[in-house]
Amino acid sequence: MSAAAPAAGADDSSRTAPLRNPGFRRLLAFRLCSILSYQIVAVTVGWQVYELTRNPWMLGLIGLAELLPYFCVAPFAGYLVDHLPRRRLGMAAGVGLALTPVLLALLTTRVIDAGVWAIYAAVVLTGMVRAFLGPVYNALFARVLPRAQFVRGASLGSIVFQSALVLGPAIGGVLVGWSGMASSYITAAVLALGVVVALAGMRVSEPAPVLQRAPIFSSIAEGARFVFGHQILLGALALDMFAVLFGGAISLAPAFIHDILAHGPEGLGILRGAPALGAVAVGIWLARNPIQRNAGRILLVAVACFGLCIIGFGLSRLFWLSAFFLLLSGVCDGVSVVMRSTILQLATPDEMRGRVSSINGLFVGSSNELGAFYAGSMARLLGLVPAVVLGGCVTISVALAAAWRAPRLRRLDLRDLQAGPLEAERGH
């Protein structure tokens, strides 16, 4: 633990106890800066590509350009996080995160003269770097907080995460509309460097070095076996993955703004930020009233309601009604994110956090990009509205299937996981 962690543990029942921990505050700053930077780039790239092509399928290719490198790098990133200094890896990732918006700014200002495919090439770098951000955050989370504060810490982390999802698209949309895409990209680069600053001042003890390391592929396989052998953890990750995959309507927001809702880039920023605004609201409530009883049932109901909200968004023709449906979808998604994050932290042994977090990224992080590609492809085949409505219907079906096929998840009470990651699974 860091030196701050024991002090923070003096009053574990306090709602604000994690925030008294300097290491945790810096970790939240790391998360805030990294997500703000990524979201500003995402909304700006989406606007730029659709302006150049007017093709929803090209928006889907943005997700694919990020997904493939992320998928290839993530297993090795988890291994490195478990075996190398985590703080330094996070700082290196921050530098890499800054390079993509710098390259995109050079493309936008024609300092580098290239076509739309150069934009996709720059996005590839983001996919590689993002593979390190989640494992670093989750591994450091367990080093700066005592176990008794994990539930509240996960809620506070979700608030920061979702707040950045609100502010990032809004900032990106405003910057694009008022001062141009280049200024938006430069702002994202500065925020990415804030990741380096946040981690540079963090005091945290790293795990003892492993004297005899297993071969890299055997070590990665060990993490996979742990996840696939833990029904509660596997069920939560799979549920979130399929919900994001089939309910990823937000990736089509630029097309809805242009073709259906008739708004500019500021409207795109509002739509992109609306789900996260709802998630922030529910995250604040959950930080004060953490869910313990019936956590599994609440998670399943939240995912089903998320699908209903996506259907409503697809059928809406009014801008503010569309934003309202996305806001409600964020409330449902916020419950899912907090539940999944808490299960991940409580169920994972410390020596495996990097690898398990990478597998979580493959389930959830990659599903965002794959969902964007799926949504773009379905929009090309079926049209914008049918593609979104179909995705919402499939999401509801996924929640029903998970309730049937994962009974341990359905019966989950989070207090069962407080005993420890190994005891919890044996107890079912």
Image: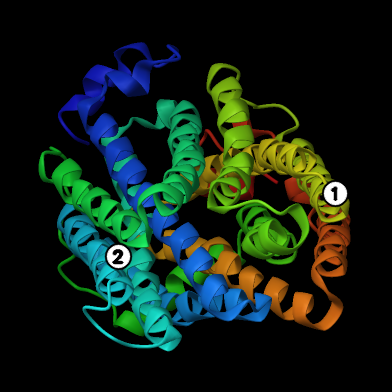
Is disc 2 placed on a helix, strand or loop? helix
Residue 177 image offset from top left, x and y in percent: 46, 51
* Amino acid bearing label 2: Pro
Is disc 1 placed on a helix, strand or loop? loop
Work out which quarter of the rendered image holds the N terminus and state it. Answer: top left
Q: Is residue 273 above or below residue 383?
A: above
Quarter of the image for residue 11 reads: top left
Foreground residue among 67 and 63: 63
User: Which residue is label 2 attached to?
Assistant: 101
- Asked whether, in this view, residue 196 is left or right of residue 324, the answer is left
- Asked whether, in this view, residue 249 is left or right of residue 178, the answer is right
Foreground residue among 183 and 143: 183
Residue at coordinates 32% horizontally, 64% vertically from top-left? 132
Residue 103 image offset from top left, x and y in percent: 26, 73
Q: Which mark is residue 70?
A: none
Q: Are marks 2 and 1 in contact (CB under 8 Å)?
A: no
Residue 411 shows in the view: no
Tally of numbered tags? 2
- Asked whether, in this view, residue 370 is left or right of residue 171, the answer is right
Residue 363 image offset from top left, x and y in percent: 57, 66
User: Which residue is label 1 attached to?
Assistant: 316
Q: Residues within 10 Å of mark 1 (few under 14, many from 20)?
A: some
